[in-house]
Image (tube, rainbow, N blue to C red):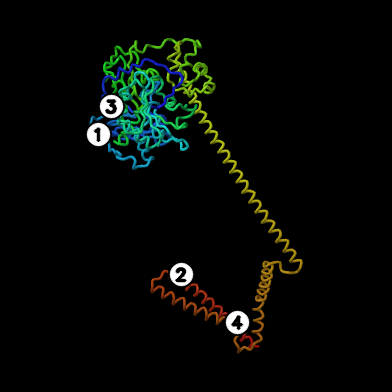
Amino acid sequence: MTQLWSFPGGIHPAENKHISTARPIAGAGLPELLVLPLQQHIGEPAEPCVDIGERVLKGQKIADVTGGMGVPVHAPTSGTIESISLQPVPHPSGMSDLCITLRPDGQDQWTALRPIDNYRDLDRETILDLIRDAGISGMGGAGFPTNIKLRPPKDRKVDTLILNGAECEPYITADDMSMRERADEILAGLRIMAWILRPERCVIAIEDNKPEAIAAIRKAAEGTQTEVTVIPTRYPSGGEKQLIQILTGMEVPSGGIPADIGVMCQNVGTAMAVSAAIFRGEPLISRVTTVTGQAVTNPGNFDVLIGTPIEYLLTRAGLDNGALHRLVLGGPMMGYTLETPAVPVVKTTNCVIAATAEELPDPAPEQPCIRCGACAEACPMELLPQQLFWYSRAGELDKAEHLNLFDCIECGICSYVCPSAIPLVQYYRAAKGEIRVQQAEQLKADRARERFEARQARLEREQQEKEQRRKERAKAAAEAQAKKQAEAEEAEKSEARGKPANDRAARAAQVQEALARKKAKTREPATVDSKNAEQPASEPAPGLEALEKQLSQATAKLNTMQSMLDDAKAENADNVEKLERAVSKNHDRVKRAEEALAEARRSVESAEAHTTDS
């Protein structure tokens, strides 16, 4: 027999579970409209992936979480997307949130499903992805994404896997009836989760006030190593931390998670959803919900499509509006009053209580605290509710947080036992919300500061790099100037020794020599004329022979160019125009040569005539 431990505090409120266990789970039917909130779990809200007016099939993904923690939302039946707008959602504040409204077409046509025959043939990451894609989040608490919960930190080995079937809160019987009627599905889902985690021990915990459920689960667990453990009925034994303490004797550390001590808890409803996702390929589109209270004539448990309006569900249960005094979503301890029944069923909706005035009367007016200490004695987390109340009401949130405010599981026991009718849990919830807002603002400010500091560091780094480049350029310029100055000084020293300083000085000397030769050539014509005057008249002058030679060369070149031009014209070549210009230019040269030769000949003839006369 499994050894059991106890936990501090706790109470035994009236159970009132018999109201909704008289008949089997029934189908809730198909309402005219389904309203599907995009935020049905802890983490980032899903984003629509369908358009208004689009027809969708049953099980089709209509919203998904592309980044961060979250799971998708699927169409509970086939129909048309009517709107994507703000609608009232189940929340203690009565707030509205973004929802997809689906109008069913009555055909209930499924999308293509991909069931897995043998999940052991796949790797664990693939199974976790299938669980995530099925939109499964915790169905017994705050709605933490199941695939993330089944992936504990790598340095945390889960030794004990607990399936929570305690269902300790009054009125709620959804898990009780599920264990009675669907025990095989629950065990199948547990086996899948155990295959993922590989724990040494698997335990299904059920309170002793559920004999039918205990018998059904024990029968389904025959031949397996799963322990079916019956625990005493005491609220809140179904709380995660309290159940772990009952079954293992260990306490989850403050601010920690069960995986820190090698334990993990899952709900029986979550196990059924995992089984349906793997073996039938069906996403999470419905859940078992209890509709109870003395203001309904047909209380019971219903298999409800996600998105079904609460008012439709109450109508199915036979609501007596005249007798209705208070509508509670959840149990009487941890639930909250609904301002309107026009909110939809979501993945975490396990109970709706339609209570009469005698059943759940209005709370008495809040009175001053008398410091009786009853809240501290009953607190299962061993907190100091009185001090937490004072600090929360005074706005001294840092002091409340210092007293482990976030260890409060909001079980409602302190409010239940308070003789002054102080709604302590409401104060704690408000304080937690304010702290979360402050933390979010602080995180935002920290990120802004980090971005500013990073920008300043970048600008400073760029300025330093720019200054370094400037210094390198200045250094290079100074080195070049020093080199130039050194060359100039070396040139002066070389000139002083009477040696050419460099090639530049040699080239200057060559230029001077060329200029001298040119000046000498300009004096040659006069010398030639004087020599020609002294030569005999019968011999031709040297200048005349030179001119005749130039004329001959020009005529030959002209003839060559003319021949090339004729050939080009015959071939229609592209360079005809260029050749014509060259021929014209050579014509001019020949003409000038002929004129120069004629002038030279006249000079010679005149000189000969002058000599004869003499």
| Mark linked to residue 578 | 2
Q: Nearer the viewer, residue 389 or 461?
A: 389
Work out whether 148 lies above or below 507.
Answer: above
Label at residue 395: none
Foreground tag (4 vs 2): 2
Given the image, on which type of amino acid does mark 2 rest? Lys
Three-letter amino acid code of the residue under disc 4: Gly
Q: Nearer the viewer, mark 2 or mark 1?
A: 1
Question: Tag 2's secondary structure?
Answer: helix
Label 3, secondary structure: give it. Answer: helix
Which corner quadrant of the image does residue 107 belong to? Answer: top left
Mark 3 lies on residue = 181
**Of pointers 4 and 2, the one earlier in the residue sequence:** 4
Instruction: Locate residue 398, reporting x and y percent.
Output: 54, 23
Q: Which-is-in-front pick, marks 2 and 3?
A: 3
Quarter of the rendering containing residue 48: top left
The residue identified by callout 1 is 109
Mark 4 lies on residue = 543
